Amino acid sequence: MQNKKLILASGSPRRKEILEKAGFDFEIRVSDVDEGIEFGTPADLVEKLSLIKAKDVAKLIKAEKKSGLVIGADTVVALDGLVYGKPKDKEEAFEMLKSLRGRAHSVFTGVSLVDAISGRRMTFHEETKVFFKNPSDDELKAYIEGGEPMDKAGAYAIQGEGAFLIERIEGDYLNVVGLPLDKLKENLSLFEQNH
């Protein structure tokens, strides 16, 4: 499918699994850049963070005198202009989930492609609307005790036990998991064509 070696600049097991199931051949190099930046709208934020991660890994690859196309990604949950990343602790996870219940929020994933040698790049994002059910405080606490919410943006995993929270979604399911696969494939083709 792709001519260049693909490098995923993410340690996310979800993103790894999405690419593996789609038949991509890639390696993983995790970027250790600080994700704690504030940057405009949720769409701006995820695009900026995905690009920072991809450029960071591209620099490492180039320094090793290797080539490849780096994929950087970042996902956040947004509600009423507030951006929810990963919760710091169980209390924050509970507050996040309480604020999401019974309402619709958006999940944004930004993706950046960076050619390690030429530095050529492309950045895009996908937005999916997620409608939450109205679980009780006890149900939320039990879910948090299981540990699943702790490394997830918005404190839930749609592909895991967190599925019980979801009434329905509008848009790309895999975007909520962490990587909008269809949009990625489409943009990878464009990136290669324009090279």
Image (tube, rainbow, N blue to C red):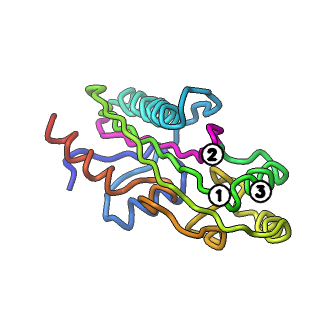
Looking at the image, is 64 positioned above or below residue 80? above
First reached walking from the N terminus: tag 2 or tag 3: 2
Relative placement, left or right, of 22 versus 167 is left
Per the model, the C-alpha gap separating discs 3 and 1 is 10 Å
Front: mark 3 or 1: 1
The residues tagged by marks 2 and 3 sit, at their Cα atoms, a distance apart of 12 Å
Residue 178, magenta (yes or no): no
N-term-proximal mark, 3 vs 1: 3
Percent position of residue 47, x then y: 45, 35
Count the marks.
3
- Going from the N terminus, do you reach mark 2 or mark 1 first? 2
Q: State whether the magenta stretch is mostly helix, strand or loop.
A: strand
> Which contiguous range is marked in magenta?
66-83
| Percent coordinates x, y for residue 69 in the rendering | 31, 40
Whether label 2 touches label 1, CB < 8 Å: yes
Dot 2: element: strand
The quarter holding residue 113 reads: top left
Mark 2: which amino acid? Leu
Residue type of the residue flagged with mark 3: Lys
Q: Which residue is mark 1?
A: 103
The residue singled out by tag 3 in the image is: 98
Which residue occupies 42% across, 59% down?
A: 171
Give the percent coordinates (x, y) of residue 97.
Answer: 73, 56
Give the residue at mark 2: 79
Task: Residue 89 in the image: state x and y as whole percent.
Answer: 81, 49
Horizontal placement of 74 versus 68: left or right? right
